């Protein structure tokens, strides 16, 4: 078994694809409309779906906003340099929720950013 993808609902699919590809550097792997179901799916990630886990962005036609809820936590991404990643995301207009620095009660360098729909993404510094 392996994790295939995490699904997030988005209120504006093009805006979300732009964030994940342009701001976080992922690739749009595939996108398909489902007219009978009135939704569109887009898959983004850093590698091929055959070997890497990806994110499924789901746009339900006509729905432009969702409540995130109290059960959602975050998606975690490993980065070489959390400080540099935050600077790059900030320069591209991304929203930094928690600036880079040591985690609470630890030494690992982390930061949190939010995607356009408000989903949190944790940036974790690469461990030696």
Image: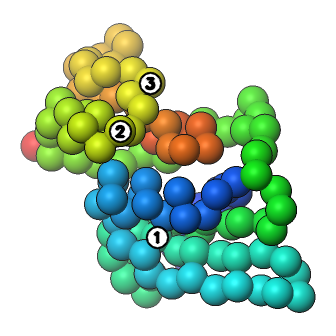
Mark 1 to mark 3 CA distance (whole Å): 22 Å
Q: Earlier in the sequence, mark 1 or mark 3?
A: 1
Q: Earlier in the sequence, mark 2 or mark 1?
A: 1
Q: Nearer the viewer, mark 2 or mark 1?
A: 2
In this view, the residue farthest toward the right is 36
In this view, the residue farthest toward the top is 105
In terms of secondary structure, where does tag 3 sit? Answer: strand
Q: Nearest the camera: 22 or 120? A: 22
Circles 2 and 1: CB atoms closer than 8 Å: no
Q: x and y percent of residue 99 in the render? A: 31, 21
Residue 93: mark in rendering? 2
Question: In the picture provided, is 16 more to the left or to the right than 68?
Answer: left
Circle 2 residues within 10 Å: few <14, some 14–19, many ≥20: few
Question: In the picture provided, is 57 more to the left or to the right than 61?
Answer: left
In terms of secondary structure, where does tag 2 sit? Answer: loop
Circle 3 residues within 10 Å: few <14, some 14–19, many ≥20: some
Residue at image location 82% in from the left, 87% down from the top = 35
Question: In the picture provided, is 53 more to the left or to the right than 26?
Answer: right
Q: Is residue 124 visible?
A: no
Q: x and y percent of residue 69 in the render? A: 77, 34
Q: Which residue is mark 3?
A: 97
Q: x and y percent of residue 11 in the render? A: 70, 54
Figure check: 49 above or below 92: below
Quarter containing the N terminus: bottom right
Residue at image location 15% in from the left, 46% down from the top = 80
Circles 1 and 3: CB atoms closer than 8 Å: no
Q: Which residue is mark 1?
A: 44
Figure check: 29 above or below 63: below
Residue at image location 78% in from the left, 75% down from the top = 39
């Amino acid at each position: 078994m392996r994790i295939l993808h995490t699904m997030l609902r988005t209120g504006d699919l093009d805006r979300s694809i732009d964030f994940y590809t342009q701001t976080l550097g992922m690739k749009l792997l595939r996108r398909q409309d489902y007219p009978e179901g009135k939704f569109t799916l887009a898959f983004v990630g850093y590698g091929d779906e055959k070997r890497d886990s990806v994110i499924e962005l789901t746009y339900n036609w006509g729905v432009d906003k969702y409540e995130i809820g109290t059960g959602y936590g975050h998606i975690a991404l490993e980065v070489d340099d959390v400080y540099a990643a935050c600077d790059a995301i900030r320069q591209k207009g991304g929203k930094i929720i928690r600036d880079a620095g040591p985690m609470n009660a630890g030494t690992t360098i982390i930061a949190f950013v939010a995607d356009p729909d408000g989903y949190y993404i944790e940036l974790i510094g690469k461990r030696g």
